[in-house]
Image (spheres, rainbow, N blue to C red):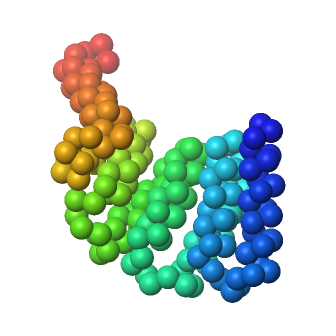
Amino acid sequence: MKKYNDALQNYQKALSINYKCLATNHPETAATYHNIGTLYAEIGNYAAALDNCKKALEMELQILPPTHPTLAITYRGISAIFINKGDYADALQYLEKALDIQIKSLPLNHPDFTDTYNNIGMVYDRQDNYQTALKNYEKAVEIASESSGGTHPAMKTYIQNVSDVRRKLSLALQCKNTVDC
């Protein structure tokens, strides 16, 4: 926990320097808020995580073009906090915004899509909507294969997610076909 406290103190110092040396709304200040939010999310303080990530988003919306890829990263980061809180409706809303920006600003086989599709799959998986989860997990695998030749760092996770949801679909079908379920 000490490392988190040290990191937080350093981010707070960086924020203070940013406000003294940079414009009121500056990409570096937004990035610092995003990093603080990520830190809070890692220690489970989701309220502080959301507060800081939303500050980053507010700044980015004022200074970046509406389809800038950084916005997609921030939307996806906020969605991860909602996923951890179990707030899947809000998570999906932010993931859809991230995906929309990515579609408008990145090549369709860009590796950033993989995390977005995987996280969308995760939301649907946790809501027991396995068909939609599978579609999104498979899209993550497809793009990871195309963009990295199968060497994407998270490829194992994406393939495991596909396998897990296929198993769940198989079990659901078996259960549906028996009287005992």
Q: Is residue 170 above or below residue 111?
A: above
Residue 127 position, x and y percent, is 41, 41
Of residue 44 and residue 114, the one placed in the foreground of this image is: 114
Would you identify the image quadrant in which residue 44 lies? top right
- Residue 32 appears in the picture as rendered: yes
Residue drawn at x 63%, y 80% as measured from the top left: 26
Image point 50% across, 82% down: which residue?
A: 64
Q: Nearer the viewer, residue 129 or 154?
A: 154
- The image quadrant where one finds the N terminus is top right
**Residue 179 drawn at (x, y percent):** 25, 15
Which residue appears at 43% of the width and 66% of the height? 72
Left or right: residue 173 versus residue 13 is left
User: Residue 70, relative to residue 119: is it above or below?
Assistant: below
In this view, the residue in front, 6 or 144, is 6
How many callouts does the rendering have? Answer: 0
Q: Nearer the viewer, residue 10 or 80?
A: 10
Q: In the figure, residue 158 lies in which quadrant? A: top left
Instruction: Name the residue at the top extreme.
Output: 180
Q: Is residue 113 above or below residue 152?
A: below
Residue at the spot x=63%, y=58% of the render? 35
- In the rendered view, tell whether residue 84 sits above or below residue 10: above
Say left or right for 144 vs 73: left
Quadrant in which the C terminus appears: top left
Residue 48 rendering spot, x and y as whole percentages:
72, 56
Q: Is residue 117 visible?
A: no
Q: Position of residue 42 (x, y in %)?
A: 64, 44
